[in-house]
């Protein structure tokens, strides 16, 4: 169960991280790339913030995530500058890819019948109960 303080800190971090990442993407020449922070969860001792990001288009997602992870100290420093009046200590930042969009897209394709999610559909006949 998240406390109000955890939720408040997560919201502050989420708003600032979005701005930091978008600005970095623009400065890095990634104009066609959308980076959004889907979710931030902070541990009960406020020492770790898990940041789930969505990257669109997804082709470069893994590569961008690795770039973000390698620049975590710079991102943390920038966050500390922005939140110095709200947070005493900036938590350790851990970035993860939030791939629910890919998951949803896969479900939609399956529902449209574009791609059969069952790998061996001929096995279904054998499993039917008589």
Image (spheres, rainbow, N blue to C red):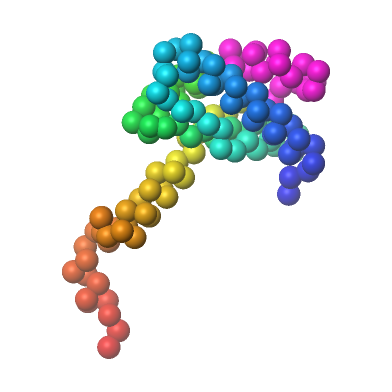
- The one of 87 and 56 positioned closer to us in this rendering: 56
Measuring from the top left, give residue 40's x and y in whole percent.
Answer: 63, 36
Q: Is residue 47 visible?
A: no
Q: In the image, 36: left or right of 123?
A: right
Which quadrant holds residue 47? top right
Residue at left offset 81%, top offset 18%: 85
Q: How many marks?
A: 0
Looking at the rendering, in which quadrant would you find the C terminus? Answer: bottom left
> On screen, 56 above or below 32?
below
> On screen, 6 above or below 72?
below
> On screen, 116 above or below 71?
below
Residue at left offset 46%, top offset 28%: 34
Q: Is residue 18 visible?
A: yes
User: In the rendered structure, does residue 95 fall within the stretch colored magenta?
Assistant: no
Q: Furthest residue to the bottom?
A: 130
> On screen, 10 above or below 104?
above
Measuring from the top left, give residue 100's x and y in whole percent.
Answer: 46, 45
Measuring from the top left, give residue 113's x and y in whole percent.
Answer: 27, 60
- The one of 37 and 88 positioned closer to us in this rendering: 37
- The one of 24 and 123 positioned closer to us in this rendering: 24
- The one of 130 and 104 positioned closer to us in this rendering: 104
Residue at left offset 74%, top offset 19%: 83
User: In the rendered structure, does residue 75 fall within the stretch colored magenta?
Assistant: yes
Residue at left offset 22%, top offset 66%: 121
Q: In the image, 25: left or right of 92?
A: left
Which quadrant holds residue 45? top right
Segment tinted magenta in the rendering: 72-92
Which quadrant holds residue 74? top right
Measuring from the top left, give residue 28's x and y in whole percent.
Answer: 44, 12
Q: Furthest residue to the left?
A: 122
């Amino acid at each position: 169960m998240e406390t109000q303080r955890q939720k408040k800190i997560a919201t502050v971090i989420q708003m600032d991280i979005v701005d930091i990442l978008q600005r970095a993407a623009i400065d890095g020449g990634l104009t066609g790339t959308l980076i959004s922070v889907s979710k931030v969860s902070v541990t009960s001792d406020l020492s770790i913030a898990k940041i789930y990001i969505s990257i669109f288009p997804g082709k470069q997602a893994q590569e961008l995530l690795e770039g973000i992870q390698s620049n975590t100290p710079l991102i943390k420093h920038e966050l500390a500058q922005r939140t110095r009046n709200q947070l005493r200590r900036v938590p350790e930042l851990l970035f993860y890819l939030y791939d629910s969009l890919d998951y949803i897209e896969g479900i939609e394709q399956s529902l449209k019948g574009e791609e059969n999610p069952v790998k061996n559909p001929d096995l279904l006949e054998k499993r039917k109960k008589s």
